[in-house]
């Protein structure tokens, strides 16, 4: 029986308590980068990871005028996979394996860093010339212990390959993992859940089950039993079945989670189960031992602290 089928449950001391599956509500840290804002929900001081997810950034929505550009200079990663998903606009990806890929709304870019990769995200000249609007989620999943040092790889999945379904007042897309009878083709290295949903006002969605699970409100507002979830908030749920959320206005959301992979250390763009491995990656970047992105000479230096 799910938590939401009864209004109460019984605590260990035998007393009845209100049944509320909400464990934690996170207000993302905002960073103003001039032309746009980035909101970082993970890692959070009270919750570093959700399943394999160790990083959750919401970029925009932002408008770039003609002549402006969004450029993230070449930088390295180890021990993780980056997942880029756009709601609006475009990004041009280049990496040290030689891949070049235009990312557009609805597609998934998956870059598995493994033992090391370098990439840059750029604005195409024709896009810069006319101006553009952009909004995206950029997430990291930590690789399981036996895959942290795998060979790096790059995978692109066009929007048409991502499975979707129309429920009662809800459009869902399963970006990674399995939910609602759909299975995503996107490669995973451990049990991973990533779902996007758009709810009409008044519509209710039963969340897919996962060992650990979080919901982020991209836009709109939700009610989760007695908890109101506003735009740009992330909520962590208890491991309970049948959790439901209802949109009090048209709402776009993302659900992420899966099985935990164990404690991870993070410094800058490096993720590892080993502090020593991160120190080695720092030295490798400082001493130019990473393969670089073909054609890109500009790069981000190693920060002194992060």
Image (cartoon, rainbow, N blue to C red):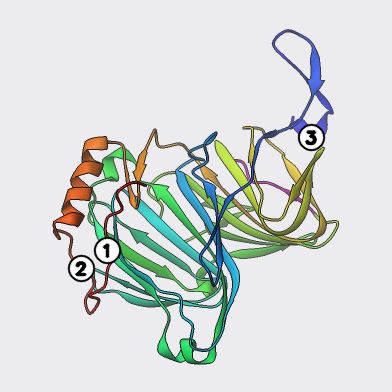
Distance of label 1 from label 3 (alpha carbons): 46 Å
Q: Residue 292: give its label.
A: 2
In the image, taking residue 157 as reference, residue 32 lies left or right, namely: right
- Give the left or right position of residue 286, taking residue 303 as reference: left
| N-terminal-most mark, 3 or 2 | 3
Q: Name the residue under label 1.
A: 118
- Residue 114 in the magenta stretch? The answer is no
100 left or right, relative to 8:
left
> Magenta includes 205?
yes
Q: Is mark 3 in CB contact (under 8 Å) with mark 2? A: no
Badge 1: few (under 14), some or many (20 or more) residues near its Cα, within 10 Å? many
Look at 53% across and 73% down and name the residue there. Answer: 159
Compared with residue 16, is residue 98 higher up or lower down, i.e. above or below? below
Q: Is mark 2 on a helix, strand or loop?
A: loop
Contact flag, marks 2 and 1 (Cβ < 8 Å): yes
* Cα–Cα span, label 2 and label 1: 6 Å
Mark 1 vs mark 3: give the one in front. 1
* Residue occupying image coordinates x 78% and y 27%: 19
Label 3 – label 2 distance at C-alpha: 52 Å
Q: Residue furthest top?
A: 13
Instruction: Judge whether 116 appears above or below 262 on screen.
Output: below
The residue that mark 3 highlights is 4
Q: Where is residue 205 in the image (x, y as percent from the top left)?
A: 74, 51
Q: Is mark 3 on a helix, strand or loop?
A: helix
State the quadrant of the N terminus: top right
Question: Who is closer to the viewer here, 104 or 292?
Answer: 292
Work out whether 18 lies above or below 293.
Answer: above
Per the image, label 1 sits on a secondary structure element best described as strand
- Give coordinates of residue 244: x percent, y percent: 75, 44
Disc 1, disc 3: CB below 8 Å?
A: no
Q: What stretch is highlighted in magenta?
A: 204-210
């Amino acid at each position: 029986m799910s938590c939401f089928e009864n209004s109460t449950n019984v605590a260990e001391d035998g007393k009845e308590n209100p049944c509320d599956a909400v464990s934690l509500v996170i207000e993302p840290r905002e960073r103003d980068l001039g032309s746009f804002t980035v909101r970082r929900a993970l890692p959070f001081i009270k919750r570093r990871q959700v399943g394999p997810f160790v990083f959750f950034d919401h970029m925009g929505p932002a408008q770039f005028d003609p002549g402006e550009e969004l450029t993230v200079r070449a930088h390295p990663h180890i021990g993780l996979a980056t997942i880029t998903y756009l709601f609006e606009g475009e990004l041009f990806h280049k990496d040290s394996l030689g891949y070049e890929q235009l990312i557009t709304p609805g597609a998934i870019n998956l870059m598995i860093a493994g033992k090391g990769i370098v990439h840059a995200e750029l604005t195409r000249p024709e896009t810069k010339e006319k101006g553009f609007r952009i909004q995206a989620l950029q997430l990291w999943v930590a690789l399981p212990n036996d895959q942290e040092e795998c060979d790096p790889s790059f995978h692109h999945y066009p929007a048409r390959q991502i499975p979707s379904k129309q429920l009662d007042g809800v459009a869902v897309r399963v970006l990674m993992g399995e939910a609602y009878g759909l299975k995503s083709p996107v490669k995973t290295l451990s049990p991973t859940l990533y779902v996007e949903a758009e709810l009409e006002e008044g519509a209710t969605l039963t969340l897919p089950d996962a060992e650990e699970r979080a919901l982020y409100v991209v836009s709109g507002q939700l009610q989760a039993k007695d908890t109101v979830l506003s735009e740009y908030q992330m909520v962590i749920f208890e491991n309970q079945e049948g959790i439901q959320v209802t949109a009090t206005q048209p709402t776009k959301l993302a659900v992420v989670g899966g099985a935990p992979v164990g404690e991870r250390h993070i410094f800058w763009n490096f993720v590892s189960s080993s502090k020593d491995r991160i120190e080695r990656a720092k030295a490798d970047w400082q001493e130019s031992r990473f393969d670089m992105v073909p054609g890109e000479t500009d790069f981000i230096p190693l920060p002194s602290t992060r």
